[in-house]
Structure formats: C-alpha cells, structure tokens
Image (cartoon, rainbow, N blue to C red):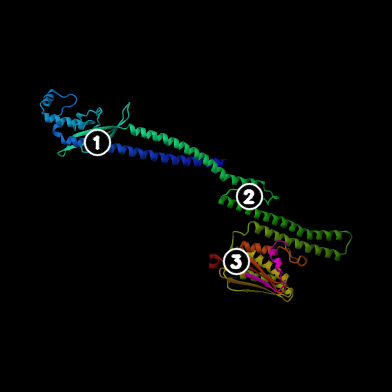
Amino acid sequence: MPSFRHRIQRVSLLIMALLMAAFSSLLYIGLSVILYTHVDNDLRLLAQAEAQEIELSTGHLMLLPHQEGHDKRSREHHERRSDEDEQEIHELREAIRSSIVLAPDGAVLWTGENARPPGVVSRQSLDEARQGHTVFETIHLQNDSPLRRIFLPIVVNSDVRFILQSDTSLRFVEETLQWLLWVLAGVAGIVLLLAWMGSNWLARQVLTPIDQVSHTASNITGHSLDTRIAMTAPYAEFQHLAHAFNSMLDRLQKAFVAQRRFVADAAHELKTPLTAMKGHMEVILQKPRTPEEYREAIVSTLGDTERLSQLTKSLLALAQLSGDRLSKNLESVNLQHVAQEVQNELQILAEDKGITLRVESESVPNILGDAVQIKRMIINLLDNALRHTPTGGTVVVHIAREQQEVTLSVADTGQGIASEHFPHLFDRFYRVDTARDRQSGGTGLGLALVKEIAEAHDGQVRVDSMVGKGTVFTIRFPLNHESESS
C-alpha cells in the first residue's frame, strides 16, 4: 500500500517542478522576444539611416562599379568623374560602411568596408524585398555566432531600385540566453531542494497528529475506553479531529457501559423467574403430591413462563430497534385508527379494573411510520397507565396537531411519579417501585421501548407528572410533505 507521506512529497515536487518549468519557459521566451525585438529595431534604424544616404545619392550610385568584376568601360568612366563627384562618392562610402547594396536581381552593387561577405542570398527574401517588404532572417554560420540580417527595399519613383542588406551578430543574444538558462537551472535546483525539504516537514506536521490518533485507537480495548487523545498540533482542523474522536469514544464508552448494564439487568430479570420455576419443580418432586398441589405448581410455573415470554419479546424488540431501527417499508399511519384498535383490545382489562379508558382525537394528518411499532408503543403506554391507575380512575388518549407536529398523549389519574425518577424513567429495567412492578407483571422495558420507537420515527417523548394527581406521557411526531398530502 502506498505511503501517504511519500505521496505528499511526490505531489509537492511535481507541482513545484511544473511551476518552475512554466515560469522558466515564460521567462526564457519573453526575454528572447525582447532581445530579438531590440536587435531587429536597432538593425532597422541602422538600415533606414543608410538608406536615406543612398536615396540622396542615387545618381552617383548608378555610376559606381561593382566591387568585384567591374569592366574596363566602368573604370574609364570612373576616371572621367569630376572632383565634385569624387567627393560625393567618398561621402557615400563613409555612410554605408557596414552594409551591402544589392540590385533588385540580387547582384552586388556596393559593399561597405565593414560589411560581412554577402554569402548566399535567399531567393524568397529577395522576392519579398522586391515587393516592397522589409525582410528579416537569421543566418546560421558553422564556426561563428549566427547573424541577424535585414533586407530593406529602397524605392525610387515608386519602384524598388535597390535593396539594402545589413547584418549584426547575435553573439550577445546567445550569450545572454545561455547565461539565463544556467541561472534558471540553478534556481530550479535550489527551489526543488527546498520544496522537497518543505514537503517532508509538511508531511510530518500533517501525519504526526494522525499517528497519535492511530496509536491511541490501536491501544483502546473494552477496559480502556476512558482513554482520550491529547492533541498537541496547534491547528484547528486537528483539534476538531481530536474532539470528534474523543466524542466518539465518549459515545462508545456510554454505549458499552449501557450494554454491559443491560446484559447484567437482563440476566438478573431472567434469573428471577427461572429460579422460581426451578424451586417449584424441586419442591414438587421432593415427595408425592395431591392433584391439587400439582395443579397449583403447574399454574405458578405457567405464570413464570409467561413472564419469561414477555421479557424475551421485549428484549427482541429492543434489539431490533437498536440495530436496524425501522423497516424501510414505511407506510402512512392513521394514529386515531391505531389508538382505537388498542382501546378495543384493552377495554376489557380496563373494565375489570374499574378504570375508564377513552380516546379523544382531532382531525390530524397521517404520519409516515411503522404501524406495528406505533401500535406496540401505544399498548405499552396504556398498559403502564392501567397498571398504575387505581380503581375508579381514568386513562385518556388524546391526539392533536400542533403546527408541524402531531402529538399523542396518554394521561392517567394514578399516583404520579416523583421528579427524581424522571432522568432514569426510560432506562431499561428501571422501576419506580420494583416490588409493585414485579407483582403486577411489569418487565421494566415498556417505557424504554416507547422511547426507542418514538426516536426511530424522529419523534420525542416527554413526561409530566405530579405525585398524587397523575402522569401524562406525550409523544411528538414531525410532519413531512408525504404526511400532509395523505
């Protein structure tokens, strides 16, 4: 598996190398353009100055012999020139000492004293110059620096009569660009070295806190969940990471403690009826019994078995809600209809105890949820209310809408609950009065199931109670667009 530290270093070096290459290329190209433009401008100014001299002496230039291969007739003609013409010719020679004058067909008419040999003239350059265009070209020599050459047309009477050829060496340009390459190479090497050192430092700064988290996480066991990370990195992101990790450990520790307590409580709750069943069996088998005694033992064992069955069902329901929460196949649930069904099922139990049980409901929209779980929640609330309401009391289920919520409340006229029990009322196996709840058949999981089912539907459960006056449990379900449209 590749190392993230090496990945940071490689990516940093690659980015820096690309940036240096782009910067160096732009700098080199930009300076090249500037230098060549400067050379061309100087060459153009020199050629234009000499062209002006030629334009002033066009009459005399026509009489000048070729520097090479002039014939006898041109020598005789030259000898017959006057002293004034000789003076003008001398001035012309001084004016164009560094250039060559060409005829439109490329023939050399004049070569200045400081001019380089004309060499081979490009036919394409001559054609463009004859058309009146100023032409630049670069001449590459074998044993010397390249030359920059200009062909400047000289127009007389709207016709190109002469072409002025001037050269200048590009030695300075080449040396400057070569020096720039060496400087850029050195700077790039230094920058890449600093980038490698910086990326190594950055990788350490980034990964050291992560190593701390990894080391702490690898050493945490079920017996050391109280371990927390002390992040030393002075960066907000790492402090947030440490805080998030420590918060996760807090939740894990609470869940682990709750799970351990739940297992212990469940074992204790299962142990009680099993011990009672075992005791009844041992007593009944000690000596022969009458049929009535056998029947009494069987009835007692059957009651313990029923209690075990209810406890097992509640534990399975809690396990399902704590794991998968709700089924994905949710449906539109009418709370009024579900409450009426539960009332019909528990009406006989309420009448046997002499308790009035009724449902009061406003017109409310349906909610999206699991109808089976919601029914179980209402049954647990009513069962809890009926068990703690004395004869002649009243239990009322009230359903209403409050803005964007649907509320379901179960109110009884029982003995009420003291406020010190509120923080633990929905804990598993918690009982306000342990002896009375066990005698009445309670498992201590009913209200815990109510809370789990309510939260699984994104709802909230609340309890209000006064000792001696009764208790009200209220569940609030949020409405969504699907609920309101149903």
CB atoms of marks 1 and 2 within 8 Å: no
- Real-space CA distance between mark 3 and mark 2, rounded to the nearest whole angstrom: 41 Å
- Real-space CA distance between mark 3 and mark 1, rounded to the nearest whole angstrom: 93 Å
Of 280 and 467, which appears nearest the observer?
A: 467
The amino acid sitting under disc 1 is: Leu
Which residue does the numbered mark 3 point to in the structure image?
477
Tell me which numbered mark, 3 or 1, is placed earlier along the sequence: 1
Q: Quadrant of residue 163?
A: top left
Of 333 and 164, which appears nearest the observer?
A: 164
The amino acid sitting under disc 2 is: Ala
- Real-space CA distance between mark 1 and mark 2, rounded to the nearest whole angstrom: 77 Å
The amino acid sitting under disc 3 is: Phe
Residue 448 coordinates in the image, percent (x, y): 68, 63
**Nearest to viewer (mark 3 / mark 2):** 2
Tell me which numbered mark, 3 or 2, is placed earlier along the sequence: 2
Image point (28%, 37%), residue name: 40
Which residue does the numbered mark 1 point to in the structure image?
46
Of 386 and 161, which appears nearest the observer?
A: 161
209 in relation to 472, above or below: above
Side of 63 relative to 380 (left or right): left
Residue 476 coordinates in the image, percent (x, y): 61, 67
Magenta residues span 408-429
Q: Residues within 10 Å of mark 1 (few under 14, many from 20)?
A: some
Please, what secondary structure does the residue beneath circle 2 have? loop
Residue 250 coordinates in the image, percent (x, y): 65, 54
Please say whether residue 96 is one of the residues in the magenta stretch. no
Q: Which mark is residue 230?
A: 2
